[in-house]
Image (tube, rainbow, N blue to C red):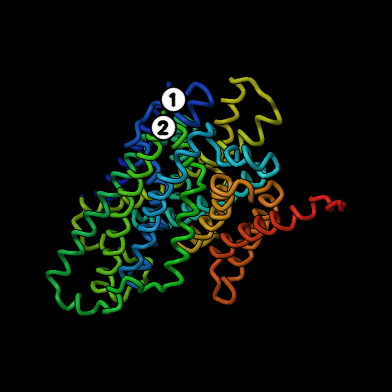
Amino acid sequence: MDRLTIIFGISFAYIAAATIVGTLSLKRTKDTESFMTAKHQMGAMVIGILMMSEFIGTGSTLGTAQAAYEKGISAAWNLIALGIGYLLYGYFMAPKFHALGEYTISGALAKHYGNAVRIVVSITMIYALTTVNVSMYTGGAATIGSLLDIPIQTAVWIIGAAAILNVTLGGIRGVGHANLIHASFKYMGLIVVALVGWSLLRANPQAVERIPKTHFSVTGVGGSTLVAWTLANIGAVFSTQYVIQCISSLSTPEDAKKASIVASITIVPIGLLAAFIGVASRGLFPDINSVMAMPAFFDVMNPWLAGIAVSSIIAATFVTILACQLGATALIMKDFYIPLANPDEKRKMQMTRAISILIGLAPIPFALYVPALLKTVFFARALRTSIAVLAVFMFYLPAVGTSRGALLGLIGGVAGTTLFFVLGNPWGIDNIYVAAIIPAVVMAAEYLFGRRRASPPAVSG
């Protein structure tokens, strides 16, 4: 067999096997509750890996390797910061979210802020999840198409079909089992490519000399970028819909904490591996486009190992797509369809699957027109950071977090973040700072000045 046939065969078999595993949960997905939360069906270890899988898409892995090719090993902070975010989430947020008994972020925040905030949070989260999925379809299809020598349009439809089958038939349990496979292959592929890179560097001392010394600096991407990544990643972890769904699938707040710690521990090595691959690529392939920092290794690898590595990129595409598709479906059903239609359980289940199909199809028309990788991914995380600010105020500053302040702050945060992203972060201010600061300032101002307006004048004597 020739090289391309081996790689294509392994990749096709991988997609088919993961999709079949994801659809096997059809028999256990009988109602919307089991579709959305899979209550008591998966333990803390499994849920922790699923939580981690939300953030290891092509933007985080290929994007981290690309950033490391350009700026050095400090690009690993992209995922190390997520590990910190999950650690903080485990101790300060996960038990509190679990205690609320809600499986949507909008429902959790509505407990304190009311229904108007629920609607705006839901729309914001759907906006963010759709943005991520368009990016994942784009980046994943472009990469898969080039690696397997198939048209990008065909790759987009393959991604869409597999994602729809996993989510529509299996619900969170099907997504969970499929994502366990995807996460495992992601790890396997990164380890294989990193070992190949290490071996090639050992055999080629001149390649090591070509790596700029600055690439080994822990602040190579810049202090401002490191801070922005930290805020964006912690904010995304604190507010992402799929993470809430995972937490609500567990039996106790203690299990929710354990799952968050598992997610923290398992995500950090992925960042280190991807960054090492990018730095090694800089020395070994100095003349390539940086976006090919990881794929460049595939041409010099054994075809069987290359098949595993290509499958890992396919895995990176699917882990995020499945999580985002399931999360958006849950929000649309719980916050819009069910309150408006008041359907019976049979109708709810039918519409849940119908909406999940539409969510899977929606990114396809846009997939060829939106830039992928880190910038778009971090914009989506910035949007979620505005929601995270509301969650922090709700749990730790409940008196300051008024309904009106939360509503105005979130609208202002989303609008400002989008504007700064579209304008290319004017004045050197990253849109993540806008996402974090506007809601906090508006909520604090509403508390201080709104309370004064509401207070009756003092009566003398």
Residue 207 falls in image quadrant: bottom left
Q: Of callouts 1 and 2, which one flags the residue occurring earlier in the amino acid sequence?
A: 1
Query: Of all residues shown, which one is farthest toward the left?
Result: 203
Q: How many numbered badges does the structure rendering display?
A: 2
Instruction: Please say if 35 is above or below 50.
Output: above
Tag 2 residue: 174
Q: Position of residue 460 (x, y in %)?
A: 87, 53
Mark on residue 306? none
In this picture, residue 443 sits left or right of residue 128:
right
**Which of these two is toward me, 422 or 255?**
255
Does residue 359 appear in this view?
yes
Secondary structure beneath label 2 = helix
Q: Residues within 10 Å of mark 1 (few under 14, many from 20)?
A: some
Does residue 130 appear in this view?
no
Q: Residue at x 36, y 34 (%)?
A: 177
**Which of these two is toward me, 368 or 309?**
309
Tag 1 residue: 26
Q: Position of residue 158 (x, y in %)?
A: 44, 44
Tell me if label 1 and label 2 are in contact, CB under 8 Å: yes
**Which of these two is toward me, 96 or 461?**
461
Residue 222 falls in image quadrant: bottom left
Residue 170 falls in image quadrant: top left
Q: Position of residue 293 (x, y in %)?
A: 32, 66
Q: Residue at x 28, y 69 (%)?
A: 279
Q: How far separated are the C-alphas under marks 1 and 2?
A: 8 Å
Query: Of all residues shown, which one is farthest toward the front?
Result: 461
Q: Residue at x 30, y 66 (%)?
A: 278
Q: Amino acid at mark 2?
A: Gly
Secondary structure beneath label 1 = helix
Instruction: Please say if 435 is above or below 127.
Output: below
**Which of these two is toward me, 408 or 26?**
408
